[in-house]
Image (cartoon, grey):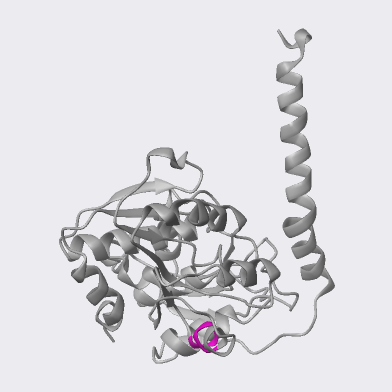
Amino acid sequence: MNFPNRNGALVSALQSWRGREIVMLLNRGTRSDGLSHLGSRALLQGLGLAWKECGDGDRPNDVRGDILLVHGASGLSHGDGGTIAKCVAALAPRFAHVVLLPATFDLRSPRVQRFVENWTAKYIVFCREMVSFDSLHAAGARPGSLQLGHDLAFHVDYSDWKDCPATGRAGIFRRDREAAFGRLPRELDAWNDAAQGTEREPQRLLDYIARFEKIYTDRSHAAIAAAMMGREVVFYRNIFFKNRAIYEHSLAPLSQVTFSEPTPFSTGQFMRAVYWGRVRPVQDKVMRLFQWRRADSPTAA
């Protein structure tokens, strides 16, 4: 199955913009987000296109062009993409077309609903699975074009990792608000949320995955990467529909990938998810605030 060729609508659109000024807006995030960035760069390079890049934390004053390509596959999906959505709203008037690269959209989130309601005819939206695609149609979303594609992580060149020696089983499970509360596998050789880190270091996630012959994960990009390396994958659900939808749309045809049925509720996993997804971010924010105030204090010197 050649996934790059199956993103035909996106490829056709990109080819039609050859010679136009293309700017790619990159979302901040984890190593998983960086994997999507790698895929989009590989796609554009393969098409012989030139582009500029900016981050959602950059000052947008000088950012303008013809085509704005927007990353935010997960950041736009479950109501956590406030930064990228605000950045898109600020930049949209400066471009002829705003292209939302293959993403998931959970319309149960008020923040996602508001973002969708602001789409105009200049928006070209690509979904990476059928649930989002059907939901946007049913909700009457009115972008200029609504298309179906596949996650950009499928476009990464995995050849440097595919043939690495691989033994044992590893778990890569979320520690954020998307983590489900079901029991996770215990008899693993390694357990590490290797997707944690910044979007600037996706290779470290790939290095970790390549070491093992079987990956258990609830991270969609880890599942995609492992599958494309030829590893055996057990893909677990997350807190909403995203993982199953991506599995059914893109990964189900691959014989080495299976989707785990819901597991019994785990108090330990519930506490783990609540702490890392809700409590720890507040702690980190308070600590950063304390450090800033201490640094500004006259006695700090």
Question: Is 79 drawn above or below residue 248 in the view shown?
Answer: above
* Whether residue 22 can be seen here: yes
Query: Where does the image place residue 162, in percent across and percent down from the top left?
Result: 31, 69
Q: Nearer the viewer, residue 102 or 39?
A: 102
Question: Is 261 drawn above or below residue 102 in the view shown?
Answer: below
**If the image is split into quadrants, where does the C terminus sit?**
top right
Picture residue at 54% right of the left edge, 66% below the top: 74
* Whether residue 30 can be seen here: no
Q: Quadrant of residue 42?
A: bottom left
Is 160 on the left or on the right of 256, as rendered?
A: left
Query: Where does the image place residue 22, in percent across and percent down from the top left?
Result: 28, 55
Look at the image and give the residue range highlighted in magenta.
130-134
Query: Where does the image place residue 263, in percent across and percent down from the top left?
Result: 72, 85
**If the image is split into quadrants, where does the N terminus sit?**
bottom left
Picture residue at 20% right of the left edge, 54% below the top: 50
Is 157 on the left or on the right of 294, as rendered?
A: left
Question: Is 297 drawn above or below residue 116 in the view shown?
Answer: above
Picture residue at 42% right of the left edge, 63% below the top: 211
Is 214 on the left or on the right of 96, as rendered?
A: right
